[in-house]
Each structure stands twice: as C-alpha cells, then as structure tokens.
Amino acid sequence: MSYEFRDYPDREMLAIDLANMIAGELRAQLDHSKRVSLAVPGGTSPGPIFDSLSATSLDWDRVDVLLGDERWVPETSERSNTRLLRERLLTGKAAAARLLPLYAEAETPEEKLEELAETIRPTLPLGVVLLGMGADLHTASIFPGADRLAEALAPDAPILLPMRAPGAPEPRITLTAPVLGGALNKHVLIFGAEKRAALEKAKGLPPEEAPINAVLDQAVVHWAE
Ligand SMILES: O=C(O)[C@H](O)[C@@H](O)[C@H](O)[C@H](O)COP(=O)(O)O
C-alpha cells in the first residue's frame, strides 16, 4: 500500500491546489467519458475546497456529485452533509452538476438503502473521490467499532451500508470501502497535528482498527496545520 503525502504551508493554499487538482482530473476524465462522478466528504474540513471548486469552469452539467457518507438527518438539520453540499459546492458554476442523494425521508437508512444504491450504481467506478478522516481513523462513515464494519470492508461489499457507531451521534449511511477505494483518483483531506500523527500511527494496522487504510492505496493525502 502506498500513498503520496502533500504538506501545505496553510489551509488556504491547500484548498486552492486541491480544488485545481480535482478539477483537472474531472476534465481529463470528461475527455473520455460522457459523465463523471465526484464523491466528497461532509464534516467541517471541506468547505473551503468546495468554495474554490464551485467557482471553477468545468462541464459541470456532465458531473454527478455525491457524498461519501451522510448522517441520517433531514436537510433542515445543521448536521446534514447534503445541506453543506448545496450551500458550498452546488452553487456558482457547479450549480449545473447533478446531485445523487444519500438521504431520503424515512425513519432509518435501511428503508431507502436499495433505492439510493441503484442511483449510484451507473456512476461506478467513481471518477474522483475526496475523503475526510477522523482522529480515530474512520473515513466516510466506516468507523472502528461500528456495527457493520466487517461488511463495509469486505471485497464484495454492497455499494451502500447503514452504519451505527459509538463515535457517530446518529445513524449513518456510507459508501463501502471497495467503492471508495475503487475510484480512479483518490484524495484524503486532513488538518492539524493530531490527525497527522494518527495517520502515521495507522501504518501497518489492519483496516478493522484503521479503516482509512482500506482506501489509501494510490491516494494523495493533503495536509495543513
Ligand atoms: O459525515 C462525516 O462526518 C464525514 O464524511 C466524515 O467521514 C468526516 O469526513 C470526518 O469525520 C472528518 O470530519 P471533520 O472534517 O469534521 O474533521
């Protein structure tokens, strides 16, 4: 397993460079495909990258945008990743992109799992994936100690799985490791000394303890303090 580690002087430079890289990869893929897919994380880190990307010229009307994972809450919730996407990525030039939802109104993710997975299936393999990571080494909603961790890591995992974990305050829905790891281009975004040290310590750990390891091969990790 090998990945590239890029160290940036600050978060602003990282956001600009990473958005440029992602846009370049999407453009290159659009030269050969009618449509391409871009999967992105929620959480607190990616906002500035979304701002930069949404202002970038690209054939956005040929891009399918989806989340790597979603908290099972409606868009009215401050915790909704879809809400973040609409506010920060699917705006400006990128408003022309198509959003593939990872949430639909229902009590539990189980009720909508198949339906949501079917909208994603035609976009596989994913073109570009951007992932976040927690200091506990989770990525998307593949958490250490989660109820369906082993299924999400299996080579024959389904596209989507519901996930409940001690580290997650609400039920989640997540793309699984083979779907995320099978993307043509992969990027991981991490900020701060704690996450950098955690990633360093993850070396050699099994993916059950360090789920990030299941998607890191050939990825570029982008880090700033
Ligand atoms: O819905 C989510 O919470 C995410 O997609 C999750 O995997 C996130 O990327 C990491 O937890 C890092 O989150 P921060 O960027 O907030 O540290």
Image: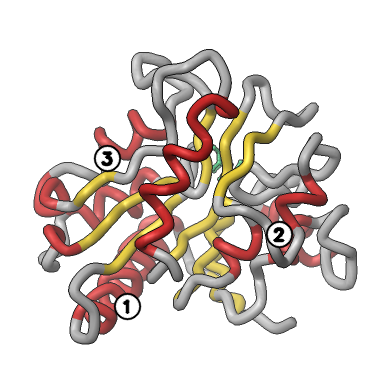
Disc 1: which residue? 25
Q: Quadrant of residue 127?
A: bottom left
Dot 1 or dot 2: first in sequence order is 1
Q: Residue at x 82, y 51 (%)?
A: 150
- Secondary structure beneath dot 3 equals helix
Residue 179 percent location from the top left of the image: 56, 62
Relative side of 163 to 210, left or right: left
- Cα–Cα span, label 1 and label 2: 22 Å
| Residue 191 seen in render | no
Residue 49 percent location from the top left of the image: 34, 54
**Is the shortest distance between ligand 1 and the CB of mark 3 under 8 Å?**
no
- Cα–Cα span, label 2 and label 3: 25 Å
Dot 1 or dot 3: first in sequence order is 1
Question: Are dots 2 and 3 in contact, CB under 8 Å?
Answer: no
The foreground one among 187 and 7 is 187
Disc 3: which residue? 88
> Which numbered dot is residue 51?
none
- Secondary structure beneath dot 1 equals helix
Q: Residues within 10 Å of mark 1 (few under 14, many from 20)?
A: some
Q: Nearer the viewer, mark 2 or mark 3?
A: 2
Residue type at mark 2?
Answer: Ile
Residue type at mark 3?
Answer: Arg
Quadrant holding ligand 1?
top right
> Which numbered dot is residue 212?
2
Residue type at mark 1?
Answer: Glu
The foreground one among 61 and 156 is 156
